[in-house]
Image: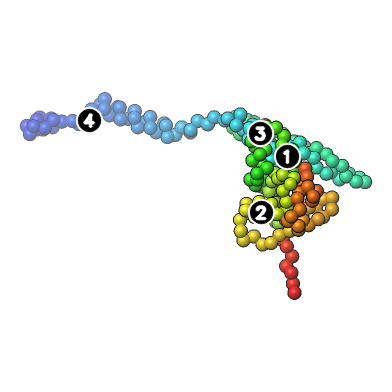
Amino acid sequence: MEKFLNDYGMIWVGDNENEAGDEDEDEARIQTTLNQPEAFSMNYDLVLQNIRNLNLLAAEGGTRITLVPGGAKLTQRPAVDLQLYTNGMGGDGAENFVLDVIETPALQTARSTSDVVPKISNLRVKSEDGEKSFILKMFFSETIGHLRSYLDAHRGCGKPPYDIISAFPHQCCHSDDTQSLLQCGLTPSAALLLRPRAKVTS
């Protein structure tokens, strides 16, 4: 074949054993790279910082009312133990629920400083269907109207009218949008729920 090509002024560039070997090596190297999973490195400092931020939003160290025989008492919220592993994170005793944090000026203020910001209330608002809880930080001086506007802006338009209810120690409907959180007794923390507003029939 080489002589035949030489007669016509051409050069045979057929299979070269070394070139074939190089191509095989390149293909094997590419295949090995594709089969290897991308290396993952856990940033534990970032995880711990995010946990601190979540604790800030959820009012770490807050109290709750616990019913006891003959009455009720304030108790510390139990902490959820977290274990960090090289392949993930596990928690014991965590409840399954959806928490939705709503941006507010008070939250931005709390994030901007490592000090405890006074006169900020931590609110947990349960949705009408009970499947979602909204977490808000608000200044004592902000009103029910502010709370309603934060909820409406976050949840979007088109939601049916609703009442804002506090269920403990006695059920109360907060219908006056001009009243402040302090006037309504929703400080330093409160658990609220949203209830569809009853239709007025004529």
Give the Cα separation between the discs numbered 3 and 4. Answer: 70 Å
Q: Is 95 placed above or below 200 here?
A: above
Nearer the N terminus, badge 2 or badge 1? 1
- Nearer the viewer's eye, disc 3 or disc 4? 3
Work out how far the residue at label 1 is from the one at label 4, CA to CA, in angstroms: 73 Å
Q: Quadrant of residue 69?
A: top right
Tell me the residue at 64%/31% (across/down).
48
Q: Return the residue found at the far bottom.
A: 202
Q: CA distance from mark 2 to mark 1?
A: 22 Å
Occupied quadrant, residue 161: bottom right
Which residue in the protein does label 2 denote? Answer: 149
Mark 4 packing: few (<14 Cα in 10 Å), some, or many (20+)? few
Instruction: Kindly check if marks 2 and 3 are in contact, taking CB atoms under 8 A apart as contact.
Output: no
N-term-proximal mark, 2 vs 3? 3
Q: How many marks?
A: 4
Residue identified by numbered label 3? 113
Q: Residues within 10 Å of mark 1 (few under 14, many from 20)?
A: some
Residue 15: which disc? 4
Depth check, front residue: 200 or 92 = 200
Q: Quadrant of residue 7?
A: top left
Q: Is residue 83 left or right of residue 17?
A: right
Give the SS element for disc 2.
helix
Residue at 75% x, 74% y: name it.
Answer: 202
